[in-house]
Amino acid sequence: MSTLARYDNPIFARQYDMGENQSNNGDIEFYTELAKKLNGRVLELGCGTGRITIPLKKAGIDVTGLDFAAEMINLARKRAGKEKLRINFKLADAVGF
């Protein structure tokens, strides 16, 4: 399995989600404040399972998440749905979208 292909593996995607969503080194706050200052729309490339996308939406920011791994997008959509958030998640490769 290639390094990138593992992100589309259901087991790896769940493990990634559990590990990543426990981490916060100030990046969520940084991106939220930056997006508010710019007062625009945000496209998060490589959004994964929505660790940053979902908090941005909760802060009232118009955000779209893009990732090439269907399993990551599926988990992001489920997480957003549990919080009753409508987020546009796109399945695409950031290199050629």
Image (tube, rainbow, N blue to C red):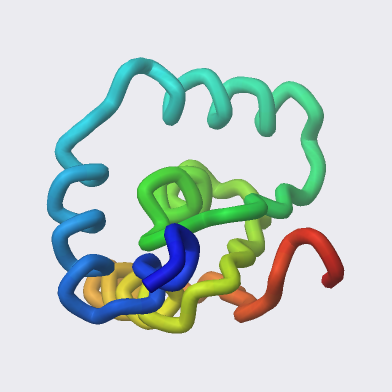
Q: In the displayed structure, does residue 6 sit left or right of residue 73?
A: left
- What is the x, y in percent for residue 82? 23, 75
Residue that appears at 73% across and 22% down? 37
Query: Which residue of the protein is positioned furthest toward the front in this rendering?
Result: 1
- What is the x, y in percent for residue 80? 35, 70
What is the number of callouts on the image?
0
- What is the x, y in percent for residue 62? 67, 55
Residue that appears at 80% across and 60% down? 95
- What is the x, y in percent for residue 32? 54, 30
Q: Quadrant of the N terminus?
A: bottom left
Vertical placement of 49 versus 78: above or below? above
Question: Relative to the observer, which residue lies in front, 62 or 9?
Answer: 9
Residue that appears at 24% across and 80% down? 10
Query: Which residue of the protein is positioned furthest toward the right in this rendering?
Result: 96
The answer to whether one can see residue 9 in this image is: yes
Q: Quadrant of residue 21?
A: top left
The answer to whether one can see residue 85 in this image is: no
Q: In the displayed structure, does residue 61 sit left or right of residue 50?
A: right
Q: Quadrant of the C terminus?
A: bottom right
Vertical placement of 9 versus 7: above or below? below
Residue that appears at 52% across and 19% down? 30
Vertical placement of 6 versus 24: above or below? below
